[in-house]
Amino acid sequence: MKLARLILGGILIAAIAAGVTGWILASQNAYSHLMGAGYDSTSTMLPLGDVAGQSASTPPADVANPASSDPNAVAEGHKLFISMNCAGCHGYDAKGGMGPDLTDTYWRYGGTPTQIYQSIASGRPKGMPSWGKKLPARSIWQLTAYIQSLGGSFPANAYQAAVQGDLADKGQNKGASDQQ
């Protein structure tokens, strides 16, 4: 009886260990198709978070999207937009839904490539999740390229114009400004 309990306990522990190992491996493999050579030299220049109590980081205004030279970046970004369920909040046409419209020129956190990258990687209040730990830099830049292709973003050298497109200050309730 005691030996049977010991054997059953060992089998139970082995089954739990196998399940946990399988779950870890499946989690790592779930996003393996997204992994690849990233644009790490540029992404390390971007401040993705601030130390508590410190002032907010100002992203460099002149950092262009490194994926802009990749002819497939927009198509890959669109695929990611659908597969990562961005369309669930922003709509399949990116004109908004529960999340903000990504096709207009109103951006609370700025519409330059660096600012869009930061919004995707770090997330934003009011519902934008952080994807920086789930997606490699290359994929985030591809998503940024797709969003830029929609026409509402700003070039890298238009940092001030990108942060002034905020409708929230005007009391209107639409656009990327009030939800992102």
Image (tube, grey):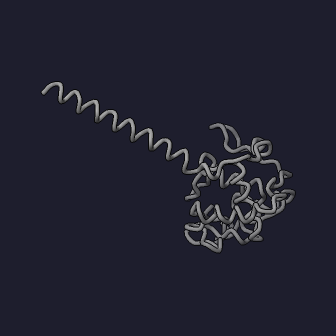
**Residue 129 occupies which quadrant of the picture?**
bottom right
Q: Foreground: 18 or 68? A: 18
Q: Position of residue 77 (x, y in %)?
A: 70, 62
| Residue 172 seen in the current view | no
Q: Quadrant of the N terminus?
A: top left
Name which residue lies at 64% across and 61% down. 80
Q: Foreground: 154 or 53? A: 154
Q: Position of residue 82 (x, y in %)?
A: 61, 66
Q: Position of residue 70 (x, y in %)?
A: 81, 58
Q: Quadrant of the C terminus?
A: bottom right
Q: Position of residue 20 (x, y in %)?
A: 41, 39
**Residue 170 occupies which quadrant of the picture?**
bottom right
**Residue 46 occupies which quadrant of the picture?**
top right
Name which residue lies at 66% across and 48% down. 35
Left or right: where does residue 82 sit relative to residue 70? left
Name which residue lies at 17% across and 29% down. 4
Q: Foreground: 27 or 108? A: 27
**Does residue 20 lie above or below 140 as drawn?**
above
**Does residue 28 lie above or below 6 as drawn?**
below
Q: Foreground: 35 or 133? A: 35
Name which residue lies at 34% across and 34% down. 14
**Does residue 57 lie above or below 12 as drawn?**
below
In this figure, what is the number of numbered marks? Answer: 0
| Residue 25 seen in the current view | yes
> Residue most toward the left?
1
Left or right: where does residue 69 sit relative to residue 18? right
